[in-house]
Amino acid sequence: MIVVFIAWRYMRQIGQRDCLNTIAVICGFISCIGICIVGNFQVTRAWTPHYVGAFMGFSVGTIYIYLATHLCYR
């Protein structure tokens, strides 16, 4: 989460103050929370939270990567 926050602050500092930067930081935080959920729930014991966390981590994380790449490209 610290890396996502630092990237958000950096983008704000260089002039990316639009809502796309805010959406990117929200997606990054959701992705980090999803990875934490995956790490705390084993698939053999509690498969529902494990797969929900995996969806949050990987799907929303992919969206975050695309947004961060787009912001860096601009």
Image (tube, rainbow, N blue to C red):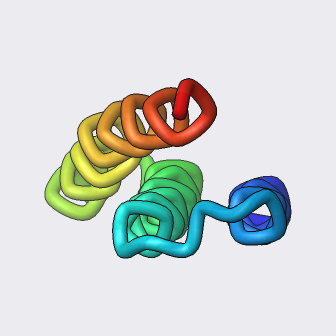
Q: Is residue 62 above or below residue 32?
A: above
Relative to 44, is 34 above or below? below
Q: Quadrant of the N terminus?
A: bottom right
**Left or right of 19: which side holds 65?**
right
Residue 61 drawn at (x, y percent)? 41, 41
Left or right: 39 with respect to 38?
Answer: right
Q: Residue at x 25, y 63 (%)?
A: 49
Identified at 56% across, 59% down, the residue is 32
- Residue 37 in view, yes or no: no
Residue 30 appears in which quarter of the rendering? bottom left
Image-quadrant location for residue 23: bottom left
Res 33 seen here: yes
Name the foreground residue: 70 vs 35.
Answer: 70
Point out residue 24 in the picture as x, y percentages from the top left corner: 44, 59
Is 28 placed left or right of 30 in the picture?
Answer: right
Q: Residue at x 37, y 62 (%)?
A: 20
Could you tell me which residue is drawn at 49 percent across and 64 percent down?
21
Q: Between residues 44 and 17, which one lies in front from this camera angle?
A: 17
| Residue 26, x across and y down, in percent | 43, 72
Residue 57 x/y as whole percent: 40, 46
State whether residue 72 is above or below residue 3. above
Residue closest to the eye, 2 or 52:
2
